[in-house]
Image (cartoon, grey):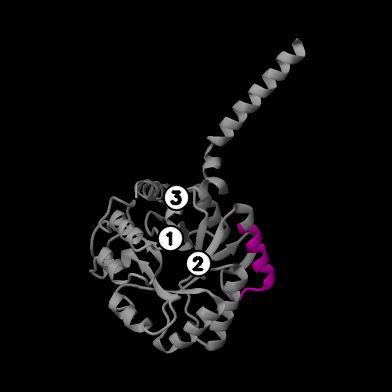
Amino acid sequence: MIMKTLLKCIVALQVIALCVVGCSPQALTSKTTLDASPESKHGWKLGAQAYTFKLYTFFEVLDKLDSCGLKYVEASPGRQIGGGMEGKMDYHMDTTKQQRIQAQLKAKGIQWISYGVVVPKTKEDWLLLFEFSKKMGIENIVTEPTREDLPLISELADKYKINIAIHNHPEPSPYWHPDTLLNAVRGYSKRIGACADLGHWVRSGLDPLECIKKLEGRVIELHVKDLNEKGKDSHDVIWGTGISNIKGIMEELKRQKFKGGFFAEYEHNWERNVEDVAECVKYFRQVSEKL
């Protein structure tokens, strides 16, 4: 009788432990949970641009993404690697560093799916960038190429099956307006399209929603920013509280049947913006759930 009672207690304790684990914050960022995240039903991947945490090394950035419930990252080439390694997240890095980075990504359960903004200057460097991206499992290269480079990178994009996402820095950057980008990529691979930076469109006096509509079929990924006001002195605020119309853009991209990455690029409150990014993630998932 005593043994039966003891066994029942052990089973009960195991059930309680499983419930506690299942409801913990760590469980909410597990692979299983994230695979069923609200945005995944739309074919969307929610991550962050490493520049959001520009005060930290790449290895530290991975910790911050993990704490925000994000499992996708866009690395920036100027970020220090960290983890006891010298050097930056540059595509010229040696094989040993590549392997160390891949091991750290695997340990954190984070996928490095996009890289930029990076602009090679020679054909040899473009080839090296594509080779590097293939090895690292990168899906998108974010860049602002010259018109002269477009024939080459169109060919390489198809050969390596890697997308080229052309970024729009504010006016007078070459690709600040969607019309300019569309004219530039006409006739080239469908793998060449836009890295739609919502905040930079606002800074250029454009309506991000109208820009997204113009680029239908050519949006590769997004740098998501919600700004407090128009103008070059504006700054990021928590998504849904600014003027970028994040919800409207999400609705439009669902209509377009867009499949791809949304990368938070939060360029404000640098020393303590993890909480802000976490709130942005919460908002995005609440909207995704209702779409």
In primary-sequence order, the first of circles 2 and 3 is 2
In primary-sequence order, the first of circles 1 and 3 is 1
Amino acid type, residue under disc 3 in the picture:
Val
The part of the image, by quadrant, that contains residue 206 is bottom left
The answer to whether mark 1 and mark 2 are in CB contact below 8 A is yes
Residue at 35%, 83% in the rendered image: 184
Q: Nearer the viewer, mark 1 or mark 3?
A: 1
The quarter of the image holding the N terminus is: top right
Label 1 crowd (10 A; few <14 / some 14-19 / many >=20): many
User: Which label sits on residue 263?
Assistant: 1
Q: Which residues are magenta?
A: 92-105
The answer to whether mark 2 and mark 3 are in CB contact below 8 A is no
Question: Residue at label 2?
Answer: 114
The residue lying toward the viewer, choosing from 252 and 184, is 252
Residue at 38%, 54% in the rendered image: 269
Residue 243, image x, y percentages = 25, 57
Amino acid type, residue under disc 2 in the picture:
Ser
- In the image, residue 233 above or below residue 3: below
